[in-house]
Image (cartoon, helix red, strand yellow):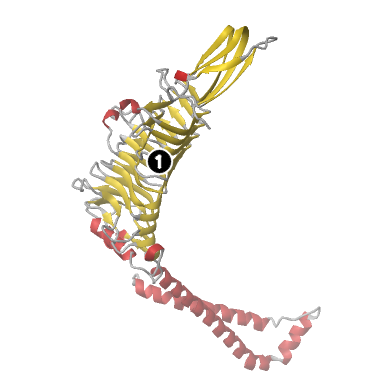
Amino acid sequence: MEPAPGRRGRCLPLLLLLGALVLALAGGATAAAWPHPHGHGGSVGLAAAADGAGMARTAGGERWYRDLALRRMESVRSSFGARRDLATASASTRVYHVTDYGADPTGATDATAAINKAIADAFSPPNNATMTGGIPDLGGAEVHLDGGTYLIKGPLTLPASGGGNFKIHSGSLRASDDFPTDRYLIELSATKSGRSYDYEYATLRDLMLDCSYRGGGVTVVDSLRVAIDNCYVAHFASDGVAVRGGHETFIRNTFLGQHMTAGGDPGERGFTGTGIRLDGNDNSVSDVVIFSAATGIMVTAPANSISGVHCYNKATGFGGTGIHLKIPGLTQAWISNCYMDYTSIVAEDPVLLHVSGSFFLGDANVVLKAVNGVARGVQVVGNIFSGRDKGVDIVQLDGKFTTVDQVYVQQNSATGMTIKSTSARASADGNGSSWTLDFSPVLLFPDRIGHVQYSLVAGDEFPSHTLRNVSGNQVVVATDKAVSATVHVLVDQNSD
């Protein structure tokens, strides 16, 4: 008959103790038969011991072996005590498994209440430690989804009391058919808390979020130092990830798409929604793929960094945008090492914008859109462009700019597209007294030359010469007499 689990647990230590006693006694018997002689006269010593010390060994030796056995038993007992302490410690760790709260990992029944209960318990601070602005330190608490798929009918929300140093990870969430269309699957938001920040050092990791075309994936509101890492957000109707207020949300190693596709989707013209929306500053998006949405990344607040992003959402030719910087007059954005796959970057009244080291495919380009006509502190440098020979400019102006200062578009390479730059050089040969060089096909801004440098090479002739005109992005150099000469000209649309 199989013993009950409780009895088996109690018998095991006893059996081990008895085993240790047997080993101890066996060791004693061996020691009695072999009194450890030393030197070359071992056999003689053994015989002498057998003849002369038998009674002493019987009286004192038995006590010694009994004491040895007791010491070994005590050692084994202490070892089991330590194991019991270890088991108690592991039982009190701050890892909250949602299945322990009744969440169905098969996705057959609603798990919203169960998961929210696990989150609420994780927000019970282990001590009085705090983080920025008094945010309770949750001590590294984890809400573990146990690799399951969970159906949720309402958003997973965090307690309004706030908290920091916690993680939600390792599972899949799927919105129900009646999930609210104006909500997000996971919401880091404490409405009207009155605090500057509600959550800090929160990590959402290894999550599959299926929004079922019913709302958004994740919203982060007035939070500090949040990481969204290695997530897959699909089937969103509004935003895949939305950040509002707060500071330093890092979105990285993540895939976002409204529809499951790998490009060339027949329904691409109908894509809607936004992959990532940044309405806060000091955030970072890195190593992210946005494979279907109307807009890849919408930025409506300054001071954000975007790098290593592959945007092939809705093509610009179909009305889509890869990255839209909708911050007229205060852009303060850094975009580098991105792959703009048929999707363009649009910057409204760019002020302090850097775009470099990126690849633009399929006539994707950079569009500077005039709102109040201001472009200042812009660098579009060191990018490569590949087009379809349709005459698309690598950098395009949308509207008229009246204030242009420190705008540098240069050192870009292109095939199948038209190079545009804020600096250019050209040479002209001729026999006469006037040389005209037209830079309008390559210069970005119309009728704007801020700086000219030229040289005239006339062989043995030494004519007087002058810079006659720079209007209409044309440079005219004139001499006082007709000569055979070559004129080399360098122009820049910046005056400093």
Residue 273 visible? The answer is yes
Residue name at image x 56 percent, y 22 percent: 490
Q: Quadrant of residue 168?
A: bottom left
Q: Is residue 121 above or below residue 233?
A: below
Q: Is residue 57 above or below residue 98?
A: below
The quarter of the rendered structure image containing the N terminus is bottom left
Residue 408: x and y in percent read: 49, 31
Q: Is residue 187 left or right of residue 477?
A: left
Between 417 and 82, which is closer to the camera in this rendering? 417
Q: Is residue 247 above or below residue 51?
A: above
- Residue bearing mark 1: 331
> Count the marks: how many?
1
Farthest left residue?
178
Between 264 and 27, which is closer to the camera in this rendering? 264
Residue name at image x 76 percent, y 88 percent: 48
Circle 1: residue type? Thr
Q: Secondary structure at mark 1?
A: loop
